Image (cartoon, rainbow, N blue to C red):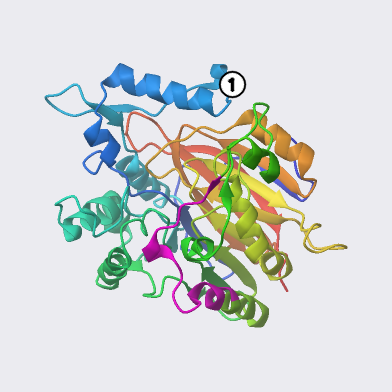
Amino acid sequence: MKLSTSCFAVSALLLSGSFNVAAQDSISFLAFGDGGYHPDYPKTKHIKKPKNKQQFIEAERADWLEDHRPIEEFNHAPIYVYPGTEIATEDTGAAAVGKAMAALCERKACEFGIQLGDNIYPDGADANDGKDDQKRMNDLILGPLKPLFKNNKELVVYSALGNHDWKTSRKGVKLQTQWMANQPNFHMDKRGYYSYKMGETGNDVEFFVLDTNMLLSGQHYYEIPLAKDGSEQGLATALAHGHAEVEDIEIHESPVNGEDHKQLAWLAKGLKTSTAKWKIVYGHHILWSIGGTKYDEGHVLRRLILPELCQYADAYIAGHEHDLELLTDDCSRVMPGNNKPKLPLIISGAASKMRGTHTPFSQQQEKRYPEYDLIWAKSFIWGFAHIELDNRSDSLNVSFYTTPHDKSGQVIPEASFSFKHRSK
């Protein structure tokens, strides 16, 4: 794993003692995603084809090997067995992460939060499962964060939509945005993408919240499995061997009246004309990652938004991968001759589910893409990120935290990094 010259690791922050309310010269917030999973809302395949604990783990192992991942790196999430049965599924860390964030915010400033999509799992609201949607959203979105709001009654979470939030219907998306409109601690614009500012003029930040599912659903692209060595197969090779499949876009996901193009134009104009000191973009889908299963989407999203991010933004934050990652893009491919600092890419998608990373894929990415740099990653964990915009040092400081499998909500500091302000 090579380290970027544009950032430096700083020691993990101490979790003892008290803090003063955030000074006006810094802005601090939580970043977490993919928190909307609980065994009470299982995938259809787990209902129709139930497995016991051993069978569930063996199926996970088979999927691991099918993706050409090293068997010595195989692991799995904690297993939940439904009471009175032998039926098993993946357990959730949502409540534990909620407790851990609440505990951290007793010791560090947390002015607000950003939620990175897949707030409802697996099928969004309006799922045809006989369950009440208000209860679904109370259970999956609000419930795990109650400890956080109990101690931070005014804290607002600014939410993005993910692919699972879109999975059922446009009605399902509308139900979620309407639910959030009635919640004092949540915010989401009804069209799915929006911007907002925090902080005082001159030391402020403007956030641009993307509906990346809308952007991707307007594109035609292929899902292509990796080669055995973890490298990307070319499209021609994959098609010749019958390996490439057109990404499945449901009819209700298809953009209406050019709404995807309108969102791109909105982002480009907003970033270019923003008067905020800091400009941060976030959405559900990744630009780069080392998970090994989302790289096709990354190619598409980089083509759509990376030029604007490289020119105007200070960071891009995403979920989608159920792990914690920190990467950078030096922007040399989209901005030849660029002399700006590298663009930080923060992934915080471990708020309820776990996923492994793909070491051979990561190594192949480093060989193929000189603009890409993996800084740090941790998988098979539950966790979140805390980000501070420090106007005194003109730096963006990101710290990653995990919480144990025992669901105690203990806060474990993992790593901290600092990046220089890059937008003008």
Instruction: Name the residue rendered at 39%, 48% in the picture.
Output: 101
SS for tag 1? loop
Q: Nearer the viewer, residue 125 or 116?
A: 125
375 drawn magenta: no
Name the quadrant containing residue 169.
bottom left
For the question of whether residue 159 can be seen, the reply is no
Q: Is residue 226 left or right of residue 369?
A: left
Name the residue: 54% across, 70% down. Answer: 207
Residue 136 image offset from top left, x and y in percent: 21, 54
Span colored in magenta: 245-264
When the figure is inspected, residue 273 is found, relative to residue 350, above or below; the finding is below
Q: Mark 1 points at which residue?
A: 70
Residue 203 position within the rendered picture, expressed as x and y whole percent measured from the top left: 61, 74
Q: Which residue is drawn at 60% across and 48% down?
A: 296
Q: Is residue 34 visible?
A: yes
Between residues 205 and 104, which one lies in front from this camera angle? Answer: 205
Whether residue 229 is situated above or below residue 234 in the rendered picture: above
* View extreme (right): residue: 337
The amino acid type of the residue labelled 1 equals Pro
Q: Quadrant of the N terminus?
A: top right
Establish if 251 lies above or below 369.
below
Image quarter in which the C terminus is found? bottom right
Where is residue 291, by image quadrant? top right
